[in-house]
Image (spheres, helix red, strand yellow):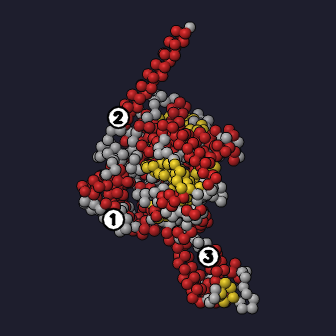
Amino acid sequence: MGIIRSACITALTGAVILEHILMKEDQRKYKQRYNKSIPMNWMPPSRSTTINNITNTKYDLVIIGGGSAGAGCLLDAASRGYSALLLEREDFASGTSSKSTKLIHGGIRYLEKAIKELDYKQLSLVIEGLRERKSFLNLAPYLTREVGILLPIRHTITIPYFWLGTKVYDWLSGSLGIQKSYFINKKEVKRVLPTIDYKKVAGGMVYFDGQMDDSRVNTMLIETAIYHEGTALNYCEVIGFKKNKGKIIGVIFKDKETGRQHTVECTGVINATGPFTDKIRQLDNPETPKIISPSVGVHLVIPGGYTGKFGMLNPSTKNGSVLFLLPWRKHSILGTTDSTGTNTMPAEKDVNYLINEMGEFVERRLIPKAKNILSAWGGIRPLAMDPSAGMDSTAIVRSHLIDKSESGLLTISGGKWTSYREMAEEAVTEAARTFRLPHKKCITKYIRLIGSHEYHINMPTYLSKTFGIPQDISEHLVSTYGDRARKVCEYANGNYTRISAKHPYITAEIPYTIDHEHVRRISDYLGRRSLFAYFNVRDAHSSVPVLLKEFKQYMNWSEDQTRIEENQAYAYLDTMGYSLLKKMEDREIKFEKFKAAVLGTCKNSLCDYNKVNSLIRKSFNLPFIPALKNSQIHKKSGTISVQEVLSTVQDHFSIIQ
């Protein structure tokens, strides 16, 4: 018996070792096959060619939605060898997938909840994110990076709590971990994050996560999928399904540029529309209950000086959420709010909330004014509810969810950017099983995105030397297009005219992104290809006339179309905070003038109430401010304190303090 047992153990051990060797060999083969350089002269087919081709093709899969989940599904399906078509009603990543916190993370806040509430689902979400984080960072090194995040600790007694939490976060990463967390004292806190009010902290834990340029990653997922024989169209809205005996056999869509309707036949359909999931599900069956519980998060971009070597996470804000202040592409990103609904237009209350919460740790004298805020924008979190668990708040799942309708519509919903690849793998695998497609392995772990293959850290210097361009332009081109920066320079043909004098964006990017990245409108370039609107929405607004001229010439727009596109560009920039920040900045200027007038008029810290009202009428074109009228006015002298005047007026106009 002992001999038999030993033989069995030996055979089992040998089988495990052999399986591991074969798996490693497969990985090596896949990496060799899918990490080959993509020819520099490759470009996706034109829009007209694509539309002409798809009406004569029956696809294995049609994917609805061009955000991270849809783009991930297209790359997964195409690289497995399935014929796949993606349709997006607006631009790729025009919704949630371009409005994230830009983190590639497991979610340290989810870990805390998982431990406190003994919630295995929350823990699974963290592990899933950490497992995907390493793969994500290798996906496109010019668009991703590691980022250190400081957890400020207020009280010495809580240091062990935060130390243990970050160490568990490291441990859960296993062999796929990045840099390890460590503790720093309050003096070191000030050194790594100069704007922090170090008097409020006892020290801090530094941990590491990943960061990305979300809309650029999304775009490159689409283009890489097309290279692998996938097909994708933006500005094509799905308006119905073709059915046979109650089963979906095709999709009806409208080309929003021409208004024409097209029908394309397919074996199966994947709904990956994020916040708009329920609209597509109810297009299939109007009686279908909703499964999306939308939540809106607003972010601000502020100057890079607000973050130092690391970013910061405030784990306990007044409303119970968390607040990130992170370095991002020589700027800082601040977020986020958390409110129910679908209105993504940023509001004053959102800006004031974020700035006030920032002041909990950042020195008050350094808090940015509206004039210092570079952009403000909101995105929808498409939280999914499990229909089998009822429709109350307890049914919300933080992970992703796959649902199938009676007609065969397969929906992937929920989840987060970090887990897009795993979500796509599960969705395509389930689609292949449901629609009886031949079984094929998922190999997206081994596929690097276009722009990555010949990218290296010294490429900006190489580009400057080779093409004779300023360093800031070469750095921008490489960090945006990777090794394709050389192709942009070829488009420039020696003409490196800047779109805006103070910024590195050049006019040659317009024809390049139209030809290579499916750009159709000015907002596509400003917001989701160059990221100009994020880094300075005011200057992006000023650049519209220059861009309009370039687009009109290259796209052959009529005068009427040019006016439509101009209005659309300005409307988009309002969603990035242009009008809001301008209004807030104008009020700040008026308030500063009012303040100077008050201090010049009032004596001994007291003001004559009637003179104050006169200054209010002159400065703000208001007869009076109600709160000031009801304040503490000295009955005999008719005076009011300067401090009360200024603070009341400041509160009335929501001036950032």
Q: Amino acid at mark 3?
A: Gln
- Image coordinates of residue 217 in percent, x first then y, are 44, 49
Q: Residue at x 43, y 35 (%)?
A: 443
The front one of 30 and 94 is: 30
Q: Is residue 286 visible?
A: no
The front one of 593 and 50 is: 593
Q: Quadrant of residue 314?
A: bottom right
| Left or right side of 327 for 490 | left
Q: Residues within 10 Å of mark 2 (few under 14, many from 20)?
A: few
Q: CA distance from mark 1 to mark 3?
A: 39 Å
* Element on which disc 1 rests: loop
Q: Are marks 1 and 3 in contact (CB under 8 Å)?
A: no
Q: Residue at x 40, y 51 (%)?
A: 518
User: What residue is disc 3 on?
Assistant: 650
User: What residue is disc 1 on?
Assistant: 498
Nearer-N-terminus badge (2/1): 2
Q: Residues within 10 Å of mark 1 (few under 14, many from 20)?
A: some
| Left or right side of 503 for 324 | right
Nearer-N-terminus badge (1/3): 1
User: What residue is disc 2 on?
Assistant: 32
| Left or right side of 636 for 163 | left
